[in-house]
Amino acid sequence: MAKKREWTLMFYLASDNPLAPGVISQLKAIKAAGFHKDANVIVQFDPFTEDTPTHIFDVNVVQKALSDKHDDIGFNSESPWVYNLLEDRLWGKEKDRHGKDIRDRLKKKYPDNEYNPGDPSDLQTKSGGEPGPKESLGDFLNFCAKWYPADHYVLFILGHGLVVGTETFLFDEHAPEHFLELKDLREVLDNFNSRSGGTLELVSFHSCSVSSLEVAYELKDCANYMLASQGAAFVGSWPYRQILMRIFNNIEKNATAAEIESMFDRIFYYCVYNSTDFLLAGYPFQVCLCNLKKICETREAIKRLSETLSASLALTDDRPRLKFPEFADSILLAHWKSQSFHQETYTDIADFCRCLYVRTTDPAANADAEAIRNNIQKACIDVVGAVKNSIVRASFAGPEYQYAKGLSIYFPWSQPLEEVWTKYKNHEFNNSQAGFSWSNFLETYFVRTMRDSIAKERENFIKNLGEEEAEPLTDDAELHQDQVTWIYTQAPLQLNQSLPGSLKSDKGDPTGDECACPSIKNYPRDIRSRKKRREEGIPADPKDAPERVPASNMFFGGSHGGT
């Protein structure tokens, strides 16, 4: 029976994709953190090169076996020695040149049975080829629960993000199932918790665009805290050596919840300070530490907001037109102005509510509209309060993310493909049994804010613009329109019924990076107030600006509790 430790720190490096070369530096950082004998540090690394096996490391297991110290944190800072991970790799049934088990030879090499790491044999004998992300992550966590039991666990996941809407989480080039869906992630973590006998304190997503309400709510019963980014995350932005050293320094029996949160708070700031240097290469960042035990109230607040916004998009009784067109414009403009991420797919929900609140401050024209306006304002206040209560820390660097509060929500401008949309509606955050949901509002939003087709606009021609009434279509023109509609209309359900297997899917490597195209957002490049800019002689009006902004103008901003 494996000895139970205080902490087991698990690193799942899903790098069977072009991230792999950069991940080596992360492995070296984990190794250089040293060790604490009351902490297990277990790493799974899946290389990208074909026919290269997946590796599992018990980091510094040999150093622990040879040392008479209880801990050696960071090793000797004055020593130029470079440690490598070959000695930490775990061996199963692999043989040496004489046909003997490498594992057995290593166990005999070190005295007093100090070297007795886990046996990964069950992970190395998979049938049917390489496992997909769900099976791979599940097996790794179960391996940790069996061989490295602990009172407290932390899971670090490094890999491609986008688990909501754009389903590309933990992309694996060579697996039969390329991605891990959000519901599968919850299932894997639930299964681990039932086996581990300890507490999963933190899930850290070193991935792009994972800090969302949908992810936090899905994992609310799986872990106590979530560390993630709303925007792009880069290999090297999480300082693993310092993170591990902090945990080693804080290890003590019967640590209180407050002490654990304080430790994660420091880890959050390590990520902030380390990631700030990515600004030198032109990359902004955002990071958020969320208390998952406080996330439940956000769904009720979002439910009320969704109901109110849907009511504001109601149609008139006499003919199909918006009853309150001013609110449709307010929602569209708030959506446009608010902080967004990854190709305008995700929107910071607290910032959206702020922009919407500002646009609905003036009294409405009649009693019905005034009631709607009051409900919108109250719903915005409730959402901002609920989100703020669930966030421990949130911070950003760079003007692109200056309005980020910490948690995003899926908010595309038009309805996605049916396959994506069906998966999104099935997330726990949109559970229909709980009543009205964000997905219900989005369905209304997509329809009620859509511009009329050109055929409809031709019917409502404007004489003052010189438009003329359209001529009736000929039979050939009608047939041509129908053909084009079937080709370009996003109707995958009908296509699947008539042409099974005809829809294409991209097997390439989605990097999870931010959109390379220009953003529709018109955000200022200097995040300071206009008064501060004027004091330094930097014009507030772009047309009066000099050709070059002073190099000393560095962008940075942070927040406590998401404010």
Image: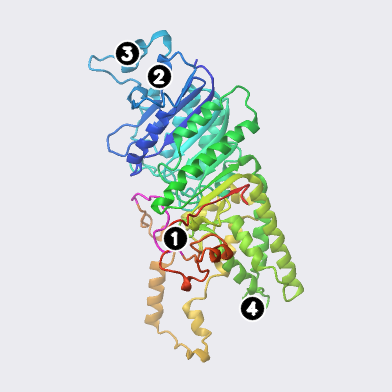
Name the spot of residue 160 as percent of width and height, x first: 42, 45
Identify the magenta region. 507-519
Q: Nearer the viewer, residue 258 or 442?
A: 258
Q: Which residue has dot 4 on it?
A: 319
Q: Nearer the viewer, mark 3 or mark 1?
A: 1
In the drawing, what numbered circle is on residue 63?
Answer: 2
Q: Are marks 1 and 4 in contact (CB under 8 Å)?
A: no
Sequence-wise, which precedes: disc 2 or disc 3? 2
Q: Are marks 4 and 2 in contact (CB under 8 Å)?
A: no
With respect to residue 287, does 329 lie above or below?
below
| Percent x, y of residue 216 | 57, 45
| Three-letter amino acid code of the residue under disc 4 | Arg
Give the residue type at disc 3.
Answer: Arg
| Earlier sequence position, callout 3 versus callout 1 | 3
Foreground mark, 1 or 4, reads 1
Label number found at residue 105: 3
Q: CA distance from mark 4 to mark 2?
A: 77 Å
- Residue 13 shows up from this direction: yes
Q: Nearer the viewer, mark 1 or mark 2?
A: 1
Question: Magenta includes 261?
Answer: no
| Residue at x 46%, y 27% (from the top left corner) | 41
Q: Which residue is mark 1?
A: 550
